[in-house]
Amino acid sequence: MAGKRVLVTGAGGFIGQALVPALADAGYRVRAAARNPSAIKSRPTEVEPVAMPDLGTGDADWSGLVEGCDYIVHLAGIAHASRAIPEADYNAVNCEAVRTLAQAAGKAGVKRLVYISSVRAQTGPVASGVIDEVSPPRPSDAYGRSKLAGEAALEDVLEGSHTDWVTLRPVLVYGPGVKGNMAALIKLAKLPLPLPLGSLKGRRSVLSVDNLSSAILFCLNSDAASRRVFLVSDLAPMVVGEIVSAIGKGLKRPPRMFSVPSGVLWAAAKLLGQADALERLDGDLVVTPQALRDAGWSPVVGTSKALADMARAAKAGT
């Protein structure tokens, strides 16, 4: 792909910081759009840091960013669920900004737009059974609804266009520098105390940021991915104890866990205001990436190794 230019929106975020160098290493010229472009590591002839437009207005001007680009990877958006964020803000950033980007891509003759949506466009934070792309979308909050609406906007705008599209619905993404629940698990694993996590049996699909980057690279050019929606995850789900054990291996700290009655754990979580976090840890959310694998993608790293590598990076402060 030498010489091909790809615009990455949200390049300064957690996923973007891994994706931009992966694209450059693969031979792409990357236009890396971020709210703070000075934080992007520029590489002469390979990475061009640029400023993002304001997505909160709902009518962002993308024309200057998409001009001359062969591909677009759209990462930018509100990337978490919060009751404190008005639904109108979610819709402006996660739906209307996708619509205007798709319109600009079509006008500029972009070959393909890869949109990074979320598993939450398809389901709530927990779900029974194994979720696949055939499962009817049932988002449970404003975040998920806005992501699903963004997917629909992309398809609507580019229907019949020469600009192609692919939508990816990743599960929880982890890797060096991750925040949120996975960062909290790293902190817990560092404690010199046994953890009361042995009774948590919820199975969760997770996704290494390196595997997501490889899926995006695959989707940029695969004919089999054209105009399709894919769930993407590591191959096998894990329970919390397995995740903590893999993190402990990276920290060179043996896992020490014990079980407590579920009622006690839930009472403590509610008292500490962590009931939502416990729900995500104790409930199932399992997806299958089989459709993407059938299209030709394969993950580049196993979950246990990737979790251990993440923990080693956290320990080293990188």
Image (cartoon, rainbow, N blue to C red):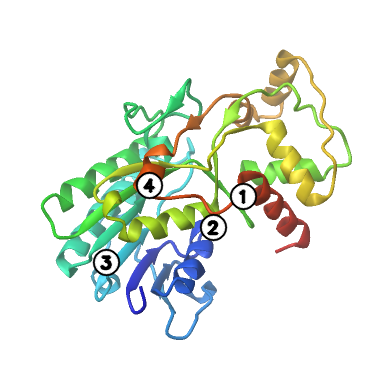
Residue at horizontal 24 percent and vertical 48 percent from the top: 227
Q: CA distance from mark 3 to mark 2?
A: 22 Å
Kindly state the secondary structure of the residue where label 3 is placed. loop
Neighbour tally class for label 4: few under 14, some 14-19, many 20 plus, Cα within 10 Å: many
Question: Mark 4 is on which residue type?
Answer: Leu
- Distance in Å between CA atoms under marks 2 and 4: 16 Å
Q: Which residue is mark 2?
A: 14
**Disc 3 residue type?**
Trp
Which comes before the other along the chain, label 4 or label 3?
3
Residue 38 % position (x, y): 51, 76
Label 1 to label 2, Cα distance in Å? 9 Å
Mark 1 or 4, nearer chain start: 4
Image location of residue 22, percent across then percent down: 49, 67
Q: Are the residues tagged 1 and 2 within 8 Å (C-beta)?
A: yes
The quadrant holding residue 229 is top left
**Which quarter of the rendered picture does the C terminus lie within?**
bottom right
The residues bearing labels 1 and 3 have C-alpha atoms spaced at a distance of 29 Å
